[in-house]
Image (cartoon, grey):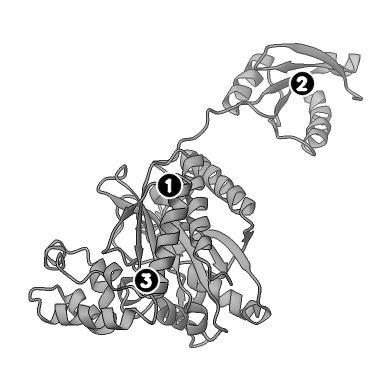
Amino acid sequence: MVNPLRGMKDTVGEFSEKYTYFIENCSRIAKNYGFSFIETPILEETALFKRSVGESSDIVGKEMYQFIDKGKNDVCMRPEGTAGVVRAFITQKYDRAGGVKRFFYHGPMFRYERPQKGRLRQFHQFGAETFGVESVKEDAMIILMLKEMFDSCGIGYKLQLNSLGCPECMPPYRENLVKFLDATEGLCEDCLRRKITNPIRVLDCKNTNCHKLLENAPILLENLCSTCKDDFSELKSILDEFGVEYEIDTKLVRGLDYYNKTAFEFVSDEIGAQSAIAGGGRYDKLVEFLDGRPTAGVGFAMGIERLMDLVVMPQSKKEGYYIGAMSESALKTVMRLVIKIRKSNVVHTQYTNKSIKAHMKVSDKVNAKYFICIGDNEIETKTYVIKDLDTKEEKSVELRD
């Protein structure tokens, strides 16, 4: 038997029901906030992610599904969603048109990492991106939208915030951080590499020993310029006004190189050790990095598989119709009725004639609300009985109706 590859999983059964419910819920909320759907290709040029995600990130350094295709192009399967959406934003010349664009997306991403609970090599993300809004109020709206998505699915969380500064306050902070790192012995190999490529990423190290060594590292929030301080204060003020609880995490830098100013993560301890279930922030230079015109950007992404154990499904309601045939001659009548009703409702049927009792068992399995059975008698009298399986009420209806 051919099995799925390690780290690849079928979306089927109960998982599929939760997945569909989650996607539909989040999509509805995103549309309410003015976002429209975008779908980008799974395959992109490798250079897109090296230039955006960053050479210092684990994604680019260790995890990408990268190969040379038959046309001698260096390509990879997308490891995250934001870079592709930004590339599409530039390709469509939206950066030249000006104005505001808001997109949401969902679909498969690929990273070659060790499979574990909630982490797969092919996984799915839901994300949203806003372009053309410099105000920190948009950062707050993004966070509020994500909170509403989690609340609607019964997912518990904690919100963590930080600010990564801007091109004015980041260089002096980076210089202070490098001095601290140069004087610190015992850092892991990844941190020593990041110290050269992107020092701030050292703060994102998951190594326990490095955590201890970095306890007294310079704090970015204490080195913000006046503009970044004001923006961060306004963000906290808006969240306070809407009753959104949050924690300040001075070590939160996110795992990608393109973030600046606002950085946030929603974390949960319901999937083992406290882990991020969604994250995002502002990336005002990313469009420019990818050769577009300077355009402010802010967004988030969440890994769907990690959330499925946390999603609280609503109590299943009976819906649609089950229509069965009790004789071979009734099958054509049933088919005509099925096709007619399917124009406005869900209809289940089977293409074999059975007894009422057998059909009723099937209708229970598909959770139908209405039950109709047609046999020779119904065809002769040109009427049939429709039964409401919730209320148990029955009514007689003419076939022509």
Residue at position x 14%, y 61% in the image: 208
- Residue with the mark numbered 3: 256
Dots 1, 2 in contact, CB < 8 A? no
Q: Position of residue 22 (x, y in %)?
A: 52, 45
Kind of residue at badge 2 = Ser
Q: Position of residue 111 (x, y in %)?
A: 38, 66
Dots 3, 1 in contact, CB < 8 A? no
Distance from the alpha carbon under mark 1 to that under mark 2: 61 Å
Badge 3 marks a residue whose secondary structure is: loop
Kind of residue at badge 1 = Val
Q: Which circle's residue, 3 or 1, is located before the other in the chain?
A: 1
Q: Which circle's residue, 1 or 2, is located before the other in the chain?
A: 1
Distance from the alpha carbon under mark 3 to that under mark 2: 64 Å
- Residue with the mark numbered 1: 244
Q: Nearer the viewer, residue 198 or 225?
A: 225
Q: Position of residue 373 (x, y in %)?
A: 75, 19
- Residue with the mark numbered 2: 327
